[in-house]
Amino acid sequence: MKRFLLPLLVLIIMAVGCTKTNDPVDAQPKTVSDVLTETASFSLLKAAIQQAGLNDALKAANLTVFAPTDDAFKAKGFSTPESFKTLTPDALRNLLRYHLVSGIITTKTPELASASNLPVETSTTSALFLTNTATGLFVNGSRVTKADQVAANGVIHTIGTLLSAPSGDALTTLKTRADAGLLVAAITRAAVARPDLLAILNGSTTNATYKTLTLFAPTDAAFSAAGYRTATDINAAAPATLANLLSYHVVSGLIFSNQFQTSQLSTFNSSTNNKVTIAVPASGPTVKGNSNTTAATIKEADILSKNAVIHMIDQVLQP
């Protein structure tokens, strides 16, 4: 009988060894689509992608996604999946594709090591601009809140802002805004005296220094407070006066809000002391003209056009 005990014991050990254990099995890396689906804060992004028919776009290899959170969508008025129906299918696709880049971009990418406004072409062919600093990675002036989330087919960067692709030059962009009608009227009137200012704003200039620019754009309320309450008031003003005023709101080059430093910036204004003063308090950056008693607050920052970054401000800057 004993001669059967050893073989039996061996069989029992082998059976136990073949039994499934709870040891983890190497899992396949999740795809970009998997990560978006499984992350609760991307529910609106996932819904928008489905409605736009862009699921296949997320299957592409070597994909970089700047992924807006639900809060980013809600801040732009998209609070539910149904709210995307306010956009045409093409508009929704273009909005989303501006967040997709072909190729892997991480904070370790050599070109990004000390990048300042590095242009990167998106799947819409419009560029977005990356800046990498000691305080973090920024896209079009907006902070990347969680970078370098590696997926099987690419990388995801979480952002707290819904990006908008530029749809036209600075003047065209202003014309689409409900709060910039008086500024557009003032630009048109000023062009009588300074057609070069109009050319800078509509992107047709040959002035290399102002091929790209930063525009501090007073809202309608700001113009009204400065005494220009209607288009009639603006058309009654001397074109040269308006040109002198408006040129003081134009700065050479793209400067996003995250790039502001306490400093003075030279403007397109032709006066000797043509600088505006930038301050960066904890409450957010401000800009002040030479003759303003208080600094202007930036009401909406980092509006990107094809030739400018526009910051809407609550005062008309006075040279």
Image (spheres, rainbow, N blue to C red):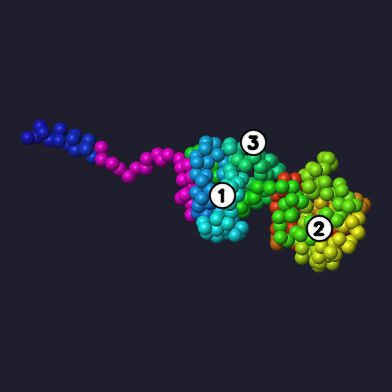
Tags 2 and 1 in contact by the CB under 8 Å rule?
Answer: no
Say whether residue 285 is visible: no
Q: Which image quarter is the N terminus in?
A: top left
Where's residue 104, x and y in %?
A: 58, 37
Give the mark nearer the N terminus: 2 vs 3.
Answer: 3
Where's residue 28, x and y in %?
A: 42, 39
Secondary structure beneath label 1: helix
Give the spatial CA distance, label 2 vs label 3: 45 Å
- Residue 197 falls inside the magenta stretch: no
Say whether residue 219 is visible: yes
Along the line of sight, which residue is nearer the eye, 15 or 34?
Answer: 34
Instruction: Name the residue that disc number 1 marks.
Output: 89
Outermost left residue: 1
Tags 2 and 3 in contact by the CB under 8 Å rule?
Answer: no
How packed is label 2: few (under 14 Cα within 10 Å), some, or many (20 or more)?
some
- Residue 31 falls inside the magenta stretch: yes
User: Relative to 305, is 9 above or below?
Assistant: above
Outermost right residue: 272
Where's residue 52, x and y in %?
A: 53, 48
How packed is label 3: few (under 14 Cα within 10 Å), some, or many (20 or more)?
few
Secondary structure beneath label 2: helix
Tags 3 and 1 in contact by the CB under 8 Å rule?
Answer: no
- Which of discs 3 and 1 lies nearer the camera? The answer is 1
Q: Which image quarter is the C terminus in?
A: bottom right
Give the mark nearer the N terminus: 3 vs 1.
Answer: 1
Give the mark nearer the N terminus: 2 vs 1.
Answer: 1
Secondary structure beneath label 3: helix
In this rendering, would 149 be left or right of 9? right
Instruction: Name the residue that disc number 3 marks.
Output: 110
Instruction: Name the residue that disc number 2 marks.
Output: 185
